[in-house]
Image (cartoon, coloured by chain):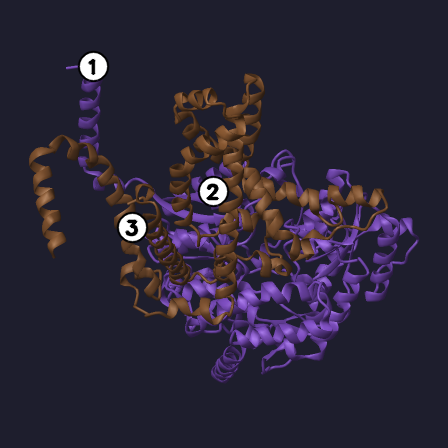
Amino acid sequence: MKTWMKWLATLMTLVMLCTTLPLAALAEEQPTEVIFYFLGEELEDDKVVLEAINEKLKEKLNCYMTVEYVPFGEVNTTYPLLLASQTRMDAIFSAYFTGYGTLAGKNAFMEMTEDMLKTYAPITWEHTPEEVWDQARVNGKLYMVPQEMIQNIQATVGIRGDLREKYGLPEIADLTSLENYMAAVAENESGIVPLLFGSMYSYLDDLLLFTPNEWAVDGNFSQICMAYDLTEEEPVPFCYLYTDEFRERCEIAYRWNQNGWISKDSLSNTNTNRENMANGKTAVMLDNAGTVNSANEDLKKNGTGEFVEIYDLSGDKSMLRYAATGGGISLPINSQHPELVLQIIDYLRNDKEMNYLVQRGIYGEDAQWYYAGETNEDGTLNENVIAAGARSQLYGGNWICWSAFRNWDYQVIESEQNSIPGYREIFYDMDSRSVNNILQSFTFDSSQYQSELATLQNVNEQYGKPLRLGFVDPATGVDEYIQMMEAAGLQTIIDAYLQQAAAYIEANK
Amino acid sequence: MKALRRFGRNLAFDFKHNKALLVMILPIAVYLIIFHYLPMCGIVIAFKQYNFAQGIFGSPWCGWNNFRFFFMSGKAWQVTRNTLLYNAAFIVVQNVLEIAAAIFLSEIAGRRFKKFTQGAMFLPNFISWVVVGAIAYNLLSYDFGFVNNVLTSLGQEKWSVYTDPQYWPGIFIFLSAWKHVGYGSIVYLAAIMGISQDIYESAALDGANEWQKIRYITLPGLQSTFIILLILAIGNIFRGNFDMFYQLVGNNGLLYNATDVIDTYVFRSLLSSYEFGMSSAIGLYQSVLCLVTLVATNLLIRRISPENALY
C-alpha cells in the first residue's frame, strides 16, 4: 500500500471513531454554544471583549456566545438569506430597518410568548415599559426583545463652522439663514458644494415637512407615504402626498436645486452624508445629532476642514420618540436554544457590570473607555458620561455593543471633549419634546398587497426621489408622481391602511 | 412515440457497444443533474407565497400572483424592451469590433506591439463594474468630475450627465465594448489561426491583396464561429447585465427610462420586501423568453445554413 493511502485510511478510521464517541455524556459538562448574528464588521478588540463576556457566561449560565457578523451593507441581501437558508443560529439582531415587521409576518422568527419571557428574562420583562413591548408586537405577537434607549433620529443641521465664520454670517436660526449660508458657499467656494446628499436623503423630508408639522411617518412602509399627527391621541393617518405642505416642501427643494445649492450629484452619490461631510465635499449635512457629531470627529481626523457646527431648527415642536424596534434581538425560527438566548439577554442587559462590559468594552485609559471625570450636581461621578480609551476605536463599531443590549439606566453619553458644542443640549432638549403615539405600535398587515407595495417602491425611487431632491419642477412633478402612484394601486393600499389603523386604535385605546 | 422508441433503441445500443464513451460522459452528466437539473425544482417558488417556516416546498401555492407586480407596474414592456435593445446593440457592436480586432491582431507583424496591444485590450475585462462605476462617477460627476473641472476651467458650460438620460445608451455601449472586446477577440483570433495558411498562400500566388484576403478568406472562415457566438449571446438576450447597469446608474430615478433593465427593476422593487417568489417569477419570465428566442434563432439558422446550427 502506498504511504498516502495508509494515511488516508488512518484518517478515515479516526474520523469514524470520533463521530461514534458518546458525545452526549460529555455535553452535560461542556458549556453550550449559543450562536448570535449581529450587524456590523468585526473589530480587533471584539474578540477580547467577547472572551471576557464568555468567561462570565460560562460561570453563570454554563454557556458561551459565538458571534457572527453580517456587514451593514448586506442587510437587504445576506440577512434575509440567512433566515431563508435556515442557517444554524440561535439569535439574530433585528430592527425595523432590517425588515423586522415583514419578516415576522412571513414566519422568519419564533414567537416569544409571555411565559417564555417571564420565565427566562424576568428582569427585562418587568423593567421594559408596556409601550415598548407594544411597539415590537406584530399582529399581537412578540418576535423581538426591543432595545431600551433614548435616541433622537430627527434631522439636525450640521454645517461647516469655519466657512460660516469666513463669510461673517450669523449662526443658523431658521431656513432663511441656512439659505444665506448656502448661497455664500455656492458663490465663493470651489471643490465644495452647499448640500450634497448621499444615500440618506429622507432627512430633507424630516427638516422641511415632517418635524415642522409635527407629523410622524410609517417607516416600515415608507413607499406608501402615510403620515399622522403625532400630537393627537387617536390620529387618523393620511397620505401626505396630497397635502399643500408637501407641495411647498417640493418647491423649497426645487429652489435649492435650481440655485445650485443641492448638488446635481445627489442622485448618483452613494456615500453617506457623514462621509460627504468628512471628505470636505459638502458644507451642509442633514442627519441625526449623533451622526453630525461623529462627522465632526471624522472631519478633524481627515484634516479636510476645521470644524462642524450643529443646529436644531425644530423649535419647540414635539417629535416621536425613537422606535423601540430600532434595535433588538429575535429568535430565528430554527433557534435551538431560545431559553438560553433570553437568559443571556436578561443577564447582559440588566447586570450593571455586564452591561458596561458589553456596551463599552474593557475599563481603563489604555483600554476601550474610562470615566470622563464629569460630575453630577451633587459632586458624585457621573457614570453615564464616558471618555474614549486608547483602544476605543477597536471596539464598538458593530451592533453587539450599541444596540440590542441597551438599557435605559446605563445609557452612555459622549464626554464634553468628544462633543460638538451644543450637541448635548440638543440631545436633551429633543428628548424632553419626545412623545409616544398609539400608532407607533401599529404594523400594517401587508400580506395581501405585496404586488402593489413592490410597484410603489419603484415609483418612489423613479419619480419621488428626483422630485424630493428638487430635480423636477413641482408644478408638473407632484401631479405626475401622484398619478404614477395611483396607477400602481396607492388608493387600494390607503383604504386598507386606514381601515386597519382605525381597527387598531379601537382595540388598543 | 416513434421518436421515443428510437431513442430507447439507441440507448440500448450505446449501453452494449459504447460503454467507454458512456463512462466518459458520466461525470459531466452527474454534475449537470446535481447542479443544473435538480435546482430547477426550485422554480416552484415562483408560484408560491413564500414563508420562512415552511420553506420552498411547504409554502402555499399562489397561482400567477407573483407575476402580477411586474405587469401591473406599466413598466414591464419598457424594461423588457430596454433589456432587449441594449443586448442587441451590445451583440452587434461587440462582434463587429471583436472581429476587426482579431483580424488586426493577426495581421500585425511586430511581436512586441502585438503582445502589448492584446494585453491592453484584455485588461479591462479584469476590472469589476464596481470600480468602473466609481471611475465613471469621478470622471462625469457634475460638481466634482474631472470632465466638468476641465470644462469649467476652459470657460465652458458644465455637462450634466447624471441628470440627462440621452447620453446613457452611448455610455453603456461604449463601456460594455471597452470591457468585453479584448476578451471576445481571442475567440475570433483562435478561429483565424485555424484557417489554413495554404489558402492564403495560393491566394497570394493568384495576386490577391491584403483586403481581398480578408474579404474572401478570413471573413468567410469566421462565419461558423460568429454564428455559434451569436446563438449563445441570444440565449441571454433578455438578461440585463445587472452589475453594469446597477453600478453605473444606481438609484438615479431620472435615468431609469433609458437605463432600466429587467434585472435592475426587479432588484429595486423587491429589495426590501423579501418576496423571493416574485423575484423568482421574473427570473422564470426571462428564462422563458430567452428559451423562445434561442430556439427560434436556431431554427432560423437551420433553415439558412444548416451546417452552422447549434443542434
Residue A363 shows up from this direction = yes
The amino acid type, in three-letter code, at marker 2 is Ile
Circle 2 or circle 1, nearest the eye: 1
Image quadrant for the N terminus of chain B? bottom left
Give the chain coloured brown: B
Q: Are marks 3 and 1 on the same chain?
A: no
For the residue carrying disc 1, how many other residues have a C-alpha within 10 Å: few (<14), some (14-19), or many (20+)?
A: few
**The quadrant where residue A226 appears:** bottom right
Q: Decide which of A329, A116 is in the foreground and name it.
A: A329
Residue A365, image x and y in percent? 65, 36
Q: Are marks 2 and 3 on the same chain?
A: no
Q: Is there a contact, CB below 8 Å, between mark 2 and mark 3?
A: no
Q: Decide which of B67, A170 is in the foreground and name it.
A: B67
Residue position for label 3: B39
Residue drawn 68% across and 66% down? A467
Query: What separation in Å lies between label 2 and label 3 (alpha carbons)?
Result: 42 Å
Label 1 secondary element: helix
Residue position for label 2: A53
Q: Is there a contact, CB below 8 Å, between mark 3 and mark 1?
A: no
Give the chain coloured purple: A
Q: Chain of mark 1?
A: A
The amino acid type, in three-letter code, at marker 3 is Pro
For the residue carrying disc 2, how many other residues have a C-alpha within 10 Å: few (<14), some (14-19), or many (20+)?
A: some
Residue position for label 1: A3
Residue A300 versus residue A153 in the image, above or below: above
Residue B24 versus residue A38 in the image, above or below: above
Query: What separation in Å lies between label 2 and label 1 (alpha carbons)?
Result: 46 Å
With B173 as the anchor, is A7 left or right in this view? Answer: left
Label 2 secondary element: helix
Residue A355 shows up from this direction = no
Q: Decide which of A219, A60 is in the foreground and name it.
A: A219
Q: Are marks 2 and 1 on the same chain?
A: yes
